[in-house]
Amino acid sequence: MKRLSKWRLLSMFAILTLILSGCGEPFLSTLKPAGEVAKTQYDLMKLSTAIMVGVIAVVVVIFFIVIFKFRRKDEKIPKQVEGNHKLEIIWTTIPILLLLVLAVPTVAATFKFADVSAMDKKNDDGKRDALVVNVRANLYWWEFEYPDDKIITSQELVVPTDERVYFNLKSSDVKHSFWIPAVGGKMDTNPENINKFWLEFDSDAANNAKNLFYGKCAELCGPSHALMDFKVKAVSRADFDQWIKDMKNAKEPKPATALAKEGQDVFNKSCIGCHAVSPQDARPEAARQAPNLATFGERSRIAGVLDHSEKDLKNWLKDPESYKPGNKMTGTYGNNGKLSDTEIAALTEFLMGLKVQD
Protein backbone atom coordinates (compact mmCIF):
# COMPACT_ATOMS: atom_id res chain seq x y z
CA MET A 1 0.00 0.00 0.00
CA LYS A 2 2.85 2.38 0.78
CA ARG A 3 4.43 1.71 -2.61
CA LEU A 4 1.07 2.24 -4.32
CA SER A 5 0.63 5.54 -2.45
CA LYS A 6 4.08 6.72 -3.57
CA TRP A 7 3.33 5.86 -7.20
CA ARG A 8 0.02 7.74 -7.02
CA LEU A 9 1.82 10.79 -5.62
CA LEU A 10 4.51 10.56 -8.30
CA SER A 11 1.87 10.23 -11.02
CA MET A 12 0.00 13.25 -9.69
CA PHE A 13 3.16 15.40 -9.74
CA ALA A 14 3.98 14.20 -13.26
CA ILE A 15 0.52 15.19 -14.49
CA LEU A 16 0.71 18.58 -12.74
CA THR A 17 4.12 19.21 -14.30
CA LEU A 18 2.72 18.44 -17.75
CA ILE A 19 -0.27 20.73 -17.22
CA LEU A 20 1.72 23.61 -15.71
CA SER A 21 4.32 23.44 -18.50
CA GLY A 22 1.63 24.75 -20.82
CA CYS A 23 0.85 27.76 -18.64
CA GLY A 24 2.42 31.14 -19.10
CA GLU A 25 1.85 34.85 -18.88
CA PRO A 26 1.42 36.75 -22.17
CA PHE A 27 4.53 38.82 -21.42
CA LEU A 28 6.81 35.83 -20.80
CA SER A 29 5.59 32.63 -22.45
CA THR A 30 6.93 31.32 -25.75
CA LEU A 31 3.60 29.51 -26.11
CA LYS A 32 1.81 32.85 -26.50
CA PRO A 33 3.68 34.41 -29.44
CA ALA A 34 3.63 38.20 -29.64
CA GLY A 35 5.26 38.92 -32.98
CA GLU A 36 6.15 37.63 -36.43
CA VAL A 37 9.33 35.87 -35.33
CA ALA A 38 7.70 34.26 -32.29
CA LYS A 39 4.68 33.15 -34.36
CA THR A 40 6.90 31.49 -36.98
CA GLN A 41 8.97 29.76 -34.31
CA TYR A 42 5.79 28.61 -32.58
CA ASP A 43 4.42 27.20 -35.84
CA LEU A 44 7.68 25.31 -36.40
CA MET A 45 7.42 23.87 -32.87
CA LYS A 46 3.87 22.71 -33.59
CA LEU A 47 4.94 21.18 -36.91
CA SER A 48 7.85 19.26 -35.38
CA THR A 49 5.67 18.11 -32.48
CA ALA A 50 2.96 16.90 -34.88
CA ILE A 51 5.54 14.93 -36.89
CA MET A 52 7.00 13.34 -33.75
CA VAL A 53 3.59 12.44 -32.33
CA GLY A 54 2.54 11.01 -35.71
CA VAL A 55 5.64 8.82 -35.89
CA ILE A 56 5.12 7.61 -32.32
CA ALA A 57 1.45 6.83 -33.03
CA VAL A 58 2.28 4.80 -36.15
CA VAL A 59 5.01 2.86 -34.33
CA VAL A 60 2.69 2.10 -31.40
CA VAL A 61 -0.08 0.88 -33.74
CA ILE A 62 2.35 -1.40 -35.63
CA PHE A 63 3.73 -2.61 -32.30
CA PHE A 64 0.32 -3.77 -31.07
CA ILE A 65 -0.61 -5.26 -34.45
CA VAL A 66 2.56 -7.36 -34.36
CA ILE A 67 1.96 -8.40 -30.75
CA PHE A 68 -1.61 -9.62 -31.29
CA LYS A 69 -1.50 -10.82 -34.90
CA PHE A 70 1.81 -12.59 -34.82
CA ARG A 71 1.95 -13.91 -31.28
CA ARG A 72 3.06 -17.51 -30.99
CA LYS A 73 0.15 -19.99 -31.02
CA ASP A 74 2.00 -23.31 -31.17
CA GLU A 75 5.46 -24.85 -31.11
CA LYS A 76 5.99 -24.64 -34.88
CA ILE A 77 8.77 -22.48 -36.16
CA PRO A 78 7.31 -19.87 -38.56
CA LYS A 79 8.61 -19.37 -42.06
CA GLN A 80 11.87 -17.44 -41.97
CA VAL A 81 11.76 -14.33 -44.13
CA GLU A 82 14.79 -12.14 -44.68
CA GLY A 83 14.44 -8.73 -46.26
CA ASN A 84 11.57 -7.06 -48.06
CA HIS A 85 12.60 -4.52 -50.66
CA LYS A 86 9.21 -2.82 -50.72
CA LEU A 87 9.13 -2.31 -46.93
CA GLU A 88 12.75 -1.18 -46.86
CA ILE A 89 12.04 1.46 -49.52
CA ILE A 90 8.96 2.63 -47.61
CA TRP A 91 10.63 2.98 -44.20
CA THR A 92 13.59 4.74 -45.80
CA THR A 93 11.53 7.12 -47.94
CA ILE A 94 9.03 8.19 -45.25
CA PRO A 95 11.67 9.57 -42.79
CA ILE A 96 13.35 11.45 -45.64
CA LEU A 97 10.03 13.04 -46.62
CA LEU A 98 9.28 13.94 -43.00
CA LEU A 99 12.71 15.55 -42.64
CA LEU A 100 12.10 17.57 -45.79
CA VAL A 101 8.69 18.68 -44.50
CA LEU A 102 10.41 20.00 -41.36
CA ALA A 103 13.66 21.21 -42.96
CA VAL A 104 12.25 23.34 -45.79
CA PRO A 105 10.21 25.79 -43.62
CA THR A 106 12.94 25.82 -40.95
CA VAL A 107 15.68 26.77 -43.41
CA ALA A 108 13.40 29.32 -45.09
CA ALA A 109 12.59 30.95 -41.74
CA THR A 110 16.27 30.97 -40.74
CA PHE A 111 17.28 32.88 -43.87
CA LYS A 112 14.32 35.24 -43.46
CA PHE A 113 15.25 36.12 -39.89
CA ALA A 114 18.90 36.56 -40.90
CA ASP A 115 18.01 39.21 -43.47
CA VAL A 116 19.15 42.47 -41.87
CA SER A 117 19.89 44.34 -45.10
CA ALA A 118 17.46 47.10 -44.07
CA MET A 119 19.95 48.12 -41.37
CA ASP A 120 22.33 49.41 -44.06
CA LYS A 121 19.80 51.18 -46.27
CA LYS A 122 19.71 54.97 -45.99
CA ASN A 123 17.31 57.52 -47.45
CA ASP A 124 18.15 60.75 -49.26
CA ASP A 125 18.84 62.46 -45.92
CA GLY A 126 21.48 59.88 -45.08
CA LYS A 127 19.37 58.35 -42.32
CA ARG A 128 17.97 54.86 -41.95
CA ASP A 129 14.25 54.28 -42.26
CA ALA A 130 14.59 51.13 -40.14
CA LEU A 131 14.85 51.41 -36.37
CA VAL A 132 18.20 50.06 -35.15
CA VAL A 133 19.06 49.44 -31.49
CA ASN A 134 22.53 48.61 -30.21
CA VAL A 135 22.25 46.13 -27.34
CA ARG A 136 25.21 45.76 -24.99
CA ALA A 137 25.14 43.04 -22.35
CA ASN A 138 27.07 43.49 -19.11
CA LEU A 139 27.44 41.69 -15.79
CA TYR A 140 24.47 41.80 -14.92
CA TRP A 141 22.58 44.54 -16.75
CA TRP A 142 21.60 45.67 -20.25
CA GLU A 143 22.29 48.86 -22.19
CA PHE A 144 20.17 50.00 -25.16
CA GLU A 145 21.52 52.61 -27.54
CA TYR A 146 19.52 54.25 -30.33
CA PRO A 147 22.43 55.34 -32.56
CA ASP A 148 20.41 57.33 -35.10
CA ASP A 149 18.85 59.41 -32.31
CA LYS A 150 21.98 59.49 -30.13
CA ILE A 151 20.23 58.44 -26.93
CA ILE A 152 21.05 55.71 -24.43
CA THR A 153 18.98 53.96 -21.80
CA SER A 154 19.39 50.87 -19.65
CA GLN A 155 17.36 47.98 -18.30
CA GLU A 156 14.16 48.97 -20.14
CA LEU A 157 14.00 48.73 -23.92
CA VAL A 158 11.36 50.86 -25.65
CA VAL A 159 10.17 49.81 -29.12
CA PRO A 160 7.30 50.58 -31.52
CA THR A 161 4.76 47.88 -32.37
CA ASP A 162 3.85 46.40 -35.77
CA GLU A 163 7.21 47.06 -37.42
CA ARG A 164 10.58 45.41 -37.54
CA VAL A 165 13.16 46.49 -34.99
CA TYR A 166 16.76 45.62 -35.84
CA PHE A 167 19.35 44.81 -33.20
CA ASN A 168 23.14 44.88 -33.02
CA LEU A 169 24.11 42.54 -30.20
CA LYS A 170 27.41 42.55 -28.34
CA SER A 171 28.86 42.02 -24.87
CA SER A 172 31.29 44.08 -22.81
CA ASP A 173 32.63 41.14 -20.80
CA VAL A 174 31.55 37.48 -21.13
CA LYS A 175 29.12 35.68 -23.43
CA HIS A 176 25.46 36.47 -22.75
CA SER A 177 22.30 35.81 -24.77
CA PHE A 178 19.50 38.24 -25.65
CA TRP A 179 16.05 36.67 -25.35
CA ILE A 180 12.51 38.04 -25.20
CA PRO A 181 10.55 34.76 -24.85
CA ALA A 182 7.15 36.03 -26.00
CA VAL A 183 8.54 37.91 -29.02
CA GLY A 184 11.36 35.74 -30.32
CA GLY A 185 15.06 35.14 -30.22
CA LYS A 186 17.34 34.10 -28.71
CA MET A 187 20.78 35.18 -29.91
CA ASP A 188 24.20 35.32 -28.26
CA THR A 189 25.95 38.56 -27.39
CA ASN A 190 29.69 38.06 -27.73
CA PRO A 191 32.61 40.28 -26.69
CA GLU A 192 34.53 39.52 -29.90
CA ASN A 193 31.90 40.09 -32.60
CA ILE A 194 28.48 41.65 -33.29
CA ASN A 195 25.40 39.52 -34.02
CA LYS A 196 22.43 41.00 -35.86
CA PHE A 197 18.77 40.09 -36.10
CA TRP A 198 15.29 41.61 -36.00
CA LEU A 199 12.06 41.25 -34.06
CA GLU A 200 8.52 42.50 -34.58
CA PHE A 201 6.19 43.32 -31.67
CA ASP A 202 2.49 42.70 -32.30
CA SER A 203 0.24 45.53 -31.08
CA ASP A 204 -2.69 43.28 -30.06
CA ALA A 205 -0.39 41.02 -28.06
CA ALA A 206 1.26 44.08 -26.52
CA ASN A 207 -2.14 45.39 -25.40
CA ASN A 208 -2.91 42.02 -23.79
CA ALA A 209 0.44 42.19 -21.97
CA LYS A 210 -0.20 45.80 -20.90
CA ASN A 211 2.62 46.92 -23.23
CA LEU A 212 5.28 45.24 -21.09
CA PHE A 213 7.31 42.16 -22.02
CA TYR A 214 10.11 40.49 -20.09
CA GLY A 215 13.58 39.81 -21.47
CA LYS A 216 16.28 37.59 -20.03
CA CYS A 217 19.83 36.45 -20.45
CA ALA A 218 19.72 32.91 -21.87
CA GLU A 219 23.41 32.04 -21.52
CA LEU A 220 24.95 31.02 -18.19
CA CYS A 221 27.22 33.96 -17.41
CA GLY A 222 27.86 33.95 -13.66
CA PRO A 223 26.26 33.74 -10.21
CA SER A 224 23.52 36.27 -11.06
CA HIS A 225 22.72 34.92 -14.52
CA ALA A 226 19.13 34.10 -13.48
CA LEU A 227 18.67 37.69 -12.26
CA MET A 228 19.88 39.37 -15.47
CA ASP A 229 16.42 40.53 -16.57
CA PHE A 230 15.25 43.51 -18.57
CA LYS A 231 11.86 44.89 -19.52
CA VAL A 232 10.50 45.82 -22.95
CA LYS A 233 7.92 48.57 -23.38
CA ALA A 234 6.11 47.99 -26.69
CA VAL A 235 4.13 51.11 -27.63
CA SER A 236 2.50 52.58 -30.71
CA ARG A 237 4.65 54.39 -33.26
CA ALA A 238 3.18 57.75 -32.18
CA ASP A 239 4.01 57.08 -28.52
CA PHE A 240 7.47 55.87 -29.47
CA ASP A 241 8.17 59.01 -31.50
CA GLN A 242 7.06 61.12 -28.53
CA TRP A 243 9.36 59.12 -26.24
CA ILE A 244 12.30 59.67 -28.58
CA LYS A 245 11.53 63.39 -28.73
CA ASP A 246 11.35 63.64 -24.94
CA MET A 247 14.61 61.73 -24.54
CA LYS A 248 16.42 63.93 -27.05
CA ASN A 249 15.13 67.09 -25.35
CA ALA A 250 15.72 65.93 -21.78
CA LYS A 251 17.42 68.53 -19.60
CA GLU A 252 19.70 68.13 -16.63
CA PRO A 253 17.61 66.78 -13.73
CA LYS A 254 16.44 69.38 -11.21
CA PRO A 255 15.65 68.03 -7.74
CA ALA A 256 12.11 68.86 -6.67
CA THR A 257 12.76 68.78 -2.90
CA ALA A 258 15.52 69.77 -0.52
CA LEU A 259 16.13 66.09 0.28
CA ALA A 260 16.46 65.29 -3.42
CA LYS A 261 18.98 68.13 -3.74
CA GLU A 262 21.04 66.52 -0.98
CA GLY A 263 20.72 63.24 -2.88
CA GLN A 264 22.04 64.88 -6.03
CA ASP A 265 25.09 66.03 -4.11
CA VAL A 266 25.61 62.47 -2.83
CA PHE A 267 25.22 61.16 -6.39
CA ASN A 268 27.78 63.62 -7.77
CA LYS A 269 30.28 62.58 -5.12
CA SER A 270 29.76 58.81 -5.09
CA CYS A 271 27.97 57.61 -8.22
CA ILE A 272 28.64 59.83 -11.21
CA GLY A 273 31.94 58.12 -11.96
CA CYS A 274 30.03 55.06 -13.21
CA HIS A 275 26.45 56.22 -13.86
CA ALA A 276 24.92 58.94 -16.04
CA VAL A 277 21.56 60.69 -15.62
CA SER A 278 21.22 62.03 -19.15
CA PRO A 279 19.96 59.99 -22.13
CA GLN A 280 22.33 61.98 -24.35
CA ASP A 281 25.29 60.15 -22.81
CA ALA A 282 28.33 61.38 -24.72
CA ARG A 283 30.81 59.16 -22.90
CA PRO A 284 32.66 56.55 -24.96
CA GLU A 285 31.41 52.99 -24.63
CA ALA A 286 34.39 51.91 -22.53
CA ALA A 287 33.51 54.55 -19.92
CA ARG A 288 29.91 53.38 -19.56
CA GLN A 289 30.52 50.85 -16.81
CA ALA A 290 27.11 51.05 -15.14
CA PRO A 291 23.47 51.53 -16.22
CA ASN A 292 22.28 54.92 -17.46
CA LEU A 293 19.78 56.22 -14.87
CA ALA A 294 18.06 58.95 -16.90
CA THR A 295 14.66 57.21 -16.70
CA PHE A 296 15.14 55.51 -13.33
CA GLY A 297 12.00 57.07 -11.79
CA GLU A 298 9.83 55.66 -14.63
CA ARG A 299 11.05 52.08 -14.49
CA SER A 300 9.03 49.08 -13.38
CA ARG A 301 11.91 47.30 -11.62
CA ILE A 302 15.03 48.12 -9.64
CA ALA A 303 18.18 46.26 -10.77
CA GLY A 304 15.89 44.36 -13.14
CA VAL A 305 14.39 42.15 -10.40
CA LEU A 306 13.21 44.23 -7.39
CA ASP A 307 9.92 46.10 -7.07
CA HIS A 308 10.18 49.77 -7.96
CA SER A 309 9.76 51.18 -4.47
CA GLU A 310 11.77 53.38 -2.13
CA LYS A 311 12.11 50.52 0.33
CA ASP A 312 13.63 48.16 -2.24
CA LEU A 313 15.89 50.88 -3.61
CA LYS A 314 17.28 51.59 -0.13
CA ASN A 315 17.85 47.88 0.43
CA TRP A 316 19.66 47.65 -2.91
CA LEU A 317 21.87 50.64 -2.13
CA LYS A 318 22.77 49.22 1.28
CA ASP A 319 23.64 45.70 0.14
CA PRO A 320 23.51 44.99 -3.62
CA GLU A 321 25.43 41.74 -3.19
CA SER A 322 22.54 40.06 -1.38
CA TYR A 323 20.26 40.69 -4.36
CA LYS A 324 22.68 40.17 -7.27
CA PRO A 325 25.78 38.22 -6.23
CA GLY A 326 28.88 39.16 -8.18
CA ASN A 327 27.53 42.45 -9.52
CA LYS A 328 30.03 45.23 -10.21
CA MET A 329 28.34 47.64 -7.80
CA THR A 330 29.17 45.50 -4.77
CA GLY A 331 31.95 47.01 -2.69
CA THR A 332 31.72 50.53 -4.09
CA TYR A 333 30.03 51.77 -0.96
CA GLY A 334 27.19 49.61 0.35
CA ASN A 335 29.08 46.87 2.19
CA ASN A 336 31.92 49.21 3.05
CA GLY A 337 29.60 51.58 4.87
CA LYS A 338 30.60 54.62 2.82
CA LEU A 339 27.03 55.93 2.77
CA SER A 340 25.03 56.53 5.91
CA ASP A 341 21.30 55.84 6.19
CA THR A 342 20.68 59.58 5.85
CA GLU A 343 22.69 59.76 2.63
CA ILE A 344 20.95 56.66 1.24
CA ALA A 345 17.55 58.22 2.00
CA ALA A 346 18.56 61.40 0.18
CA LEU A 347 20.00 59.46 -2.77
CA THR A 348 16.78 57.42 -2.99
CA GLU A 349 14.72 60.62 -3.15
CA PHE A 350 16.92 61.92 -5.98
CA LEU A 351 16.90 58.70 -8.02
CA MET A 352 13.13 58.25 -7.75
CA GLY A 353 12.71 61.71 -9.24
CA LEU A 354 14.71 60.95 -12.39
CA LYS A 355 12.01 61.07 -15.05
CA VAL A 356 11.99 62.14 -18.68
CA GLN A 357 8.22 61.67 -19.09
CA ASP A 358 5.86 62.56 -16.23
Image (cartoon, rainbow, N blue to C red):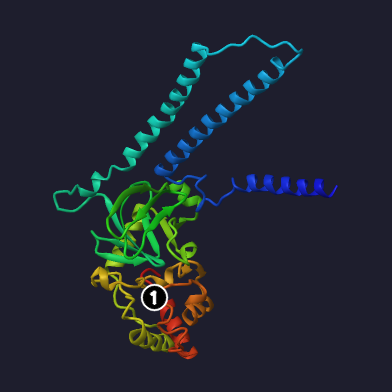
**Is 162 left, or right, of 206 in this rendering?**
left
Looking at the picture, tell me which residue is in the foreground, 329 or 283: 329
Within 10 angstroms of label 1, few (less than 14), some, or many (20 or more) residues? many
On screen, 54 above or below 162? above
At 52% from the left and 12% from the top, the residue drawn is 84
> From the viewer's perspective, is 82 left or right of 137?
right
Residue nearer the viewer, 194 or 155: 194
Residue 159 falls in image quadrant? bottom left
Quadrant housing the C terminus? bottom left
201 or 133, nearer to the observer: 133
Please give the residue where the numbered disc 1 appears in the rendered image.
354
- For residue 53, above or below residue 10: above
> Foreground: 217 or 356?
217
What's the residue at 29%, 63% (across, down)?
245
The part of the image, by quadrant, that contains residue 243 is bottom left
Identify the residue at image location x=35%, y=39%: 110
Residue 164 in picture, x, y percent from top left = 33, 47
Residue occupying image coordinates x 48% and y 38%: 45
Compared with residue 355, is residue 149 higher up or lower down, i.e. above or below?
above
Q: Position of residue 270 (x, y in %)?
A: 36, 85
Q: Position of residue 175 (x, y in %)?
A: 37, 59
Residue 235 x, y percent position in the rendering: 40, 55
User: Mark 1 belongs to which amino acid?
Assistant: Leu
Label 1 SS: loop
